[in-house]
Amino acid sequence: MLILSGTLLPLDTAPAWMRAVASVNSINWVVQAERALLDGELCAIPVLWGWIAALALAAVGVLIGVRTIRKSD
């Protein structure tokens, strides 16, 4: 997931299939939002998508965590 998010390697020169897979990777949206924020673009569209992706990942993580804890009791 990290390689396909553009965190470790830039996706600008990546093959087309890798860019296509990265476009549906929610971590990629968070990374793009971070880059936009570092560039000073506070109201950019990637920032909005990054927030949505981060909140969705957090919600899924909480649901999986709660379910796992409940099963262990």
Image (tube, rainbow, N blue to C red):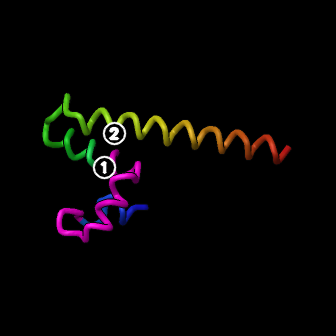
- Position of residue 3 relative to residue 31, above or below, is below
Task: Give the residue pinned by disc 2.
Answer: 50
| Residue 22 image offset from top left, x and y in percent | 34, 58
Task: Give the residue pinned by disc 1.
Answer: 31
Quick one: which residue is furthest to the top in this view?
Answer: 43
The image quadrant of residue 10 is: bottom left
- Quadrant position of the C terminus in the picture: top right
The image quadrant of residue 69 is: top right
Q: Earlier in the sequence, mark 1 or mark 2?
A: 1
Q: Which circle marks residue 63 in the picture?
A: none
Q: Amino acid at mark 1?
A: Val
Taking the spot 58% from the left edge, 43% from the top edge, the residue there is: 61
| Residue 52 image offset from top left, x and y in percent | 40, 34
- Quadrant position of the N terminus in the picture: bottom left
- Asked if the residue at tag 2 contacts the one at tag 1, i.e. Cβ–Cβ closer than 8 Å, the answer is yes
Q: Which element is circle 1 on?
A: helix
Overall secondary structure of the magenta stretch? helix
Q: Which element is circle 2 on?
A: helix
| Residue 4 image offset from top left, x and y in percent | 36, 63
Q: Nearer the viewer, residue 61 or 24?
A: 24
Label 1, residues with CA under 10 Å away: few <14, some 14-19, many ≥20: some
Q: Amino acid at mark 2?
A: Gly
How many angstroms separate mark 1 from mark 2 (CA)? 7 Å
Q: Which residues are magenta?
A: 10-31
